[in-house]
């Protein structure tokens, strides 16, 4: 392991800075005339140029979507979100909105609440069971011609898979884009409500408009603590080796360690240490070496052998959420 005078390791889940809402997808800029087959699923499988149909990194909620309809009446369309699998043409259904009856000849906008995450792909579901040509079933203008490098996959799905299940979308249309846009809002507390317009309690997870029901008490803490570890070369002169830890919240910090010494690389265990750390306060934990380990380490260092104490650090908060990481400290006389 590469050593430095002030190494920082992050434990637990990194929480990014709050993001702002964004939009993905594109509407047909002309007068839609196409007619997509009914009872079918569609996904933007490849794209080139802006705007993108791919959900950016992070946790989001699809809060609304829009479609530019053709002049036919009674057409049904619903938004879908897919995730590509390792098998070409096979996608996992992430989320599905209700089928909507389109108002002909203009832009239709509908509210939704579909949790999505980075890498998910925008798609559509065409309703209306099959009718005669030229409607080709559904009749909605779900795609429009676009530059080379854009492609759409689709498949007839008489019954859709459940969310989390896979479906084959085998047919491929090259140089096409889907006629759909979606507005995404961040979901910092991961409760499935868009933080800007749907979540009445942003930052606190809850099932009632993003809030905990009245009288339910505070939501259960499920966030793992984070910690910064600082290590540097340490002398064995006092029979102890250690490192510094800064926890993101009040937590119990436990450190276990060992040293490999000699040609056979025998493992010598160090006595574990623990401390109750307050939030954002630097605390040092020292692990004691036995007399036997200290003598063996001293002999090895004098012979020019490089020794490192290897640590496993665990931080656990009062709710039982825990995270761990490993670090190493180079030893000296």
Image (cartoon, grey):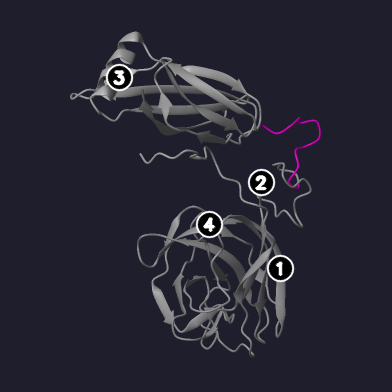
- Quick one: label 3, few (<14), some, or many (20+) residues within 10 Å? many
- Quick one: label 4, few (<14), some, or many (20+) residues within 10 Å? many
Q: What separation in Å lies between label 1 and label 3 (alpha carbons)?
A: 70 Å
What kind of element bears circle 2? loop
- In the picture, the disc for residue 215 is none
Please identify the residue farthest to the left as the structure is shown: 263
What kind of element bears circle 4? strand
Give the mark nearer the N terminus: 3 vs 2.
Answer: 2
In this figure, which residue is indicated by the disc labeled 2? 191
Q: What separation in Å lies between label 4 and label 1 (alpha carbons)?
A: 18 Å
Residue 225 lies in quadrant: top right
Please identify the residue farthest to the top as the structure is shown: 291
**Closer to us: mark 3 or mark 2?**
3
Q: What separation in Å lies between label 4 and label 3 (alpha carbons)?
A: 56 Å
Please tell me whether residue 213 belongs to the stretch shown in magenta.
Answer: yes
Give the mark nearer the N terminus: 4 vs 2.
Answer: 4
In this figure, which residue is indicated by the disc labeled 3? 297
Q: Position of residue 294 (x, y in %)?
A: 33, 14
Q: Identify the magenta region.
A: 209-220
In this figure, which residue is indicated by the disc labeled 4? 94
Q: Position of residue 119 (x, y in %)?
A: 50, 61
């Amino acid at each position: 392991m590469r050593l430095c005078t002030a190494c920082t390791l992050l434990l637990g889940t990194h929480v990014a800075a709050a993001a702002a809402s964004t939009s993905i997808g594109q509407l047909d800029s002309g007068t839609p005339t196409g007619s997509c087959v009914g009872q079918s699923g569609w996904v933007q499988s490849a794209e080139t140029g802006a705007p993108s149909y791919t959900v950016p990194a992070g946790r989001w909620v699809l809060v609304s979507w829009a479609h530019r309809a053709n002049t036919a009446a009674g057409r049904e369309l619903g938004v879908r979100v897919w995730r590509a699998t390792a098998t070409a043409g096979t996608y996992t259904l992430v989320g599905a909105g209700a089928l909507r009856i389109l108002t002909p000849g203009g832009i239709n906008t509908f509210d939704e609440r579909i949790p999505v995450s980075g890498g998910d792909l925008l798609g559509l579901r065409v309703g209306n069971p099959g009718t005669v040509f030229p409607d080709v079933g559904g009749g909605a203008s779900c795609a429009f011609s676009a530059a080379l490098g854009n492609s759409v996959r689709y498949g007839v799905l008489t019954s859709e898979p459940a969310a989390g299940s896979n479906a084959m979308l085998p047919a491929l249309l090259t140089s096409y884009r889907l006629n759909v846009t979606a507005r995404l809002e961040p979901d910092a507390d991961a409760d499935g409500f868009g933080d800007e317009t749907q979540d009445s309690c942003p930052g606190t997870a809850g099932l009632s408009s993003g809030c905990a029901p009245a009288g339910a008490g505070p939501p259960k803490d499920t966030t793992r603590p984070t910690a910064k570890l600082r290590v540097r070369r340490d002398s064995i002169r006092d029979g102890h080796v250690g490192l510094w830890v800064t926890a993101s919240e009040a937590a119990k910090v436990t450190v276990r360690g060992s040293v490999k010494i000699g040609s056979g690389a025998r493992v010598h265990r160090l006595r574990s240490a623990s401390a109750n750390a307050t939030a954002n306060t630097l605390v040092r934990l020292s692990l004691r070496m036995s007399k036997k380990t200290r003598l063996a380490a001293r002999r090895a260092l004098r012979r020019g052998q490089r020794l490192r104490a290897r640590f496993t650090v665990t931080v656990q908060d009062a709710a039982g959420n825990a995270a761990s990481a490993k670090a190493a400290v180079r030893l000296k006389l």
